[in-house]
Amino acid sequence: MKSIIFISAFLIGLNINAQNLYDIGNITLIEIEFSESNWDEILDQYYANDLDERLVCASFKLNGQSFDSVGVKFKGNSTYNANNTKNPLNIKLNYILNQDYQGYKTLKLSNGSKDPSFVREVLSYEIGRKYMDMPFSNYTKIIINSNYYGLFSSSEAISGDYLERRFYSNRNNVRFKCNPISVMGGVSPSLEYLGIDSSLYADGYELKSNLGWNDLVNFTNQLSNNINNIENYLDVDRALWMLAFNNVLVNLDSYTGPFQQNYYLIKDDNNRFIPIIWDLNQSLGSFSMVTSGGGPGASSNINDLTNMDLFLRENDATFPLISQLLGIPMYRKMYVAHCRTILDENFSNNDYYSRAQYMQNIIATEVQNDPNAIYTSAQFYSNLDNSYSSGGVGPGAQDIYGVSELMGARTSFLESLAAINLVSPVVTNIQTPSVVQPNSSVSITASISNVNYAYLGYRDYVGDVFTKTEMFDDGLHNDGVAGDGTFGVDINVSAQDIQFYIYAENTDAGIFSPVRAEHEFYDLNIIGDVKVNEIMTTNNGTIADQNGEFDDWVELFNNSNVDVDLSGYYLSDDSLNLLKWTIPNGISIAANDYLIVWLDKDTLQSGLHANFKMSASGEILYFLDANQNLLNQVQIPLMESSTTYGRYPNGIGSFIRMRATYNTENSYTALNVEEHQLTSDSEVNILIYPNPTQQLINIQVDYENKLDFMIFDMTGKLVYSGQLNQTESLEISDWKKGIYFIQFPELNLLKKVVKQ
């Protein structure tokens, strides 16, 4: 994806000391020593026993870091075989001891047996993460007893830890793995309502939490019999993104496919189920059955996949998640809007192919050297464009269509559909107050054309449900003159920052702004007195505390012109214990000044040291005042070593990844990011002017063909994409002040533009 290419250029000026476990640009190294020479035979026996037995390693290293008593077992259904020389692995770092690597405790490794190209799983997860919460995924090299065992794709486990990292939920919340005991008949995880007896569901769903069967029964009942209130029980937007993803990417080993499997259902703290896609090794057409069985209903040629109905299953009551949701006109328009976004951002621009080539280049040497490779190097390269056939007939026969062979034709088919080409509203010129005080009323307006209905979705915490409030062009909502095309809405805000998006529709189509909503959103920053300003969760030699130790820290900033007494304020990393650490009496923060609190559990040391640490793999930091009012709750993403997550502009802006600006003003200049020529073979002349700019930029290019370009903000978020011949003029009045990067992927070129 383009943002990953951007991020790699973005990090040139940073001091990165430790490899991220799921860094796509680097191959993770795992070195295992078993005392038993017949370890493979033992693991086969454990798999056959099906008792979750594991073989304990004599030694285990992950990217050079040693762990004791790690447990290993084989995993997989169709990808495991006792005769395989390389089987999928499930590795538990905390099998006996409480230990983790960057917050991760379980590693799930796939052998690529269904994908000669070896890119489908990692590429599909990368695409999906743009639009919904999905596991991280990259590549891992395994050494066992000093011998190269093979190359694997490695994907983040959906565990209790995953709930806390991604869904701001208790790790013990209800969680189901939606895979049937058998795909050949019996109960599938179709989400059909089967009655109140929970035992009727047991063969189709695997309960991964302590309790939850009654929750599942109630949810399926609501889905089938109370669809108009389904948003009380289901995160509908995430469900629509999942269905759109499955359809556009021809991901048929999924809920959309004949076996209705390979997803999780997780209940968040709002009592709604969230669907999470899992197991993408057969995405992008490796799994070719549109319907179950081997008769005429089964897909047998590439046309069945490339021309697959955009609304597949919409009239099939045995697929209620599809038939019920698409039966609601607004949800149907949202689904199409999501399909269009996935198509535009990944396939119409051929980005998926560039990313696939990038991934193959990273792993090519390891694929060639893999002594247990399932496919040859020639098949590895060829399957990116051409079909692989195992030959023969019957259950063992397998055709795996080329990634571009399938998706090139699928893209053309989808682009030709009337539903994709219906004209949606246009949302521009979103306006919010430049300064928002806590506990006030705020007006948000936008210019919206060709529209029948629009709403604003907003919330003051990333773990909450968006409140949806209709926007009006009636002259009564600070929207100017009635009927002038400006829509407005008034909302009340607390002391916390607001996240919001806009949805608009007409009779034919709908559109989100930003287009990746609800997964992405705009920020409205509240100017409070004291705010969390910057956080470091992996301090590898950047800033030392009073004892010379390099620990996590948080920086508070006082936006006001008076000193603020912080006695009795609270910091916490636990939603169930928001009063975890109390700032001692007598501590104050001066006007327009900073205060550092070390998050290191070293409460007996001098200075301010909280009784908890932060996780580099992602966690929430809570900040409350002495009256226990929640002032800030910051969702910290997965962080690189020695980088911080801070506000820009300082004290009032949104959070971005940056280089540490400890105890001083946050600034982009600390990143030392400049224009970056990724390769030196381009002689194309590109002129961007004026730069800096306040509103209008022009991109002038000396190039004989149309040229794709994308614009990203400093976080790697795509804010605009387009195509130009000679000169493109862009209005950027609705963009925030800051630094943006314009990328020309065909030229491997990155240019910087500053919005003043």
Image: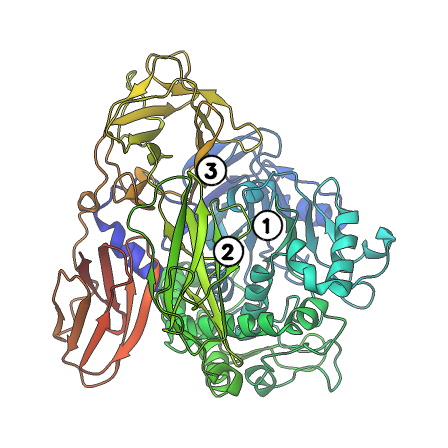
Residue 149 place in picture, x, y as percent: 51, 52
Between 153 and 392, the one nearer to me in the picture: 153
Q: Is residue 473 above or below residue 370?
A: below
Going from N to C along the chain, the mark reached first, 1 or 3, is 1
Between 42 and 646, the one nearer to me in the picture: 646
Residue 669 in sight: yes
Residue 119 place in picture, x, y as percent: 47, 65
Q: Check residue 152 in the rendering and tell me which mark sits there, or answer none.
A: 2
Q: Check residue 89 in the rendering and tell me which mark sits there, or answer none.
A: 1
The amino acid type, in three-letter code, at marker 3 is Ile
Q: Check residue 703 in the rendering and tell me which mark sits there, or answer none.
A: none
Choose top left, top right, bottom left or bottom right for residue 174.
top right
Q: Is residue 308 above or below residue 227?
A: below
Q: Are marks 1 and 3 in contact (CB under 8 Å)?
A: no
Q: CA distance from mark 2 to mark 3?
A: 31 Å
Residue 438 place in picture, x, y as percent: 39, 39
Q: Is residue 375 above or below residue 209?
A: below
Going from N to C along the chain, the mark reached first, 2 or 1, is 1
Going from N to C along the chain, the mark reached first, 2 or 3, is 2
Q: CA distance from mark 2 to mark 1?
A: 9 Å
Residue labelled with disc 3: 620
